[in-house]
Image: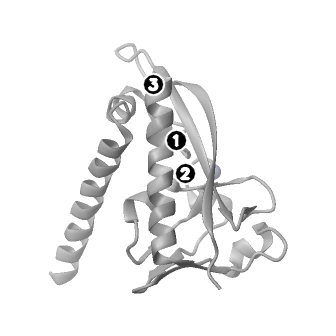
Amino acid sequence: MTAKLTFELTESFEEALSFDEATTGGRYLRVEVSPLIDGCPLLASGGLVFDALSVLVSGATSAELDLYTCSCGVAGCAGIFEDCQCLVTEDSVNWRFPEEPFAKWFAPGMPLEIHFSLPGYVAALARLEGDLEARRAACGAPLLLAPCELVDERDLTEAAVPFHDFLQAKQAQHAEWLSALAEADET
Ligand SMILES: [Zn+2]
């Protein structure tokens, strides 16, 4: 059985912090993304933040990642010390959550391992990306995905571009980081 993945978006306008006199802060649209599994929230309550940027950056490739994190962006702060597995096969994508601490956060009956069809998963991410760009374009402000509490002007300049460009820049950074990691492994 494969599940249908959709996303629920919650948005609010926030003011960036000024860390010194040289920066003036600025307004941005903060968007929190929550995955829905067959239309149902994965978590029983709030408290953890879904890391939508990591999910969009890794796309349909197998990876170990923090699908959820603390609202401050540090997973360990919310008692998450083990990565989630995103396992991609030729026709499916599987999310596997470690029992600790997710068993206690999940909605009753929600399994710790969730299977999506590969085309369904790819389409869900593309829809999310399209929705985010539509919201950014409509609000005329930089768009930042939660968790993003501590932002200053540099982050806002980065996030003021069309969401697709922002995402591609993050994917390029991620690819660079992966190849640096692979090189470090070889030596
Ligand atoms: Zn925290």
Indicate yes or no: mark 1 CB to ligand 1 under 8 Å. Answer: no
Please report the residue visible at 34 percent of the width from the left and 30 percent of the height from the top: 154
Disc assigned to residue 73: 2
Density class for disc 2 (Cα within 10 Å; few <14, some 14-19, many ≥20) is many
Q: Could you tell which of marks 1 and 3 lies nearer the N-terminus?
A: 3
Residue 93 rendering spot, x and y as whole percentages: 50, 79
Kind of residue at disc 1:
Cys
The kind of residue on which mark 3 rests is Ala
Q: Is residue 179 left or right of residue 150?
A: left
Does any atom of ligand 1 lie closer than 8 Å to the CB of label 2?
yes
Q: Residue 148, which numbered label?
A: 1
* The disc label shown at residue 141, or none: 3
Instruction: Give the mark nearer the N terminus: 2 vs 3.
Output: 2
Q: Which of the 4 quarters of the picture holds residue 1?
A: bottom right
Q: Which residue occupies the foreground of this view, 117 or 101? A: 117
Direction from residue 35 to residue 43 in the image, left or right: right
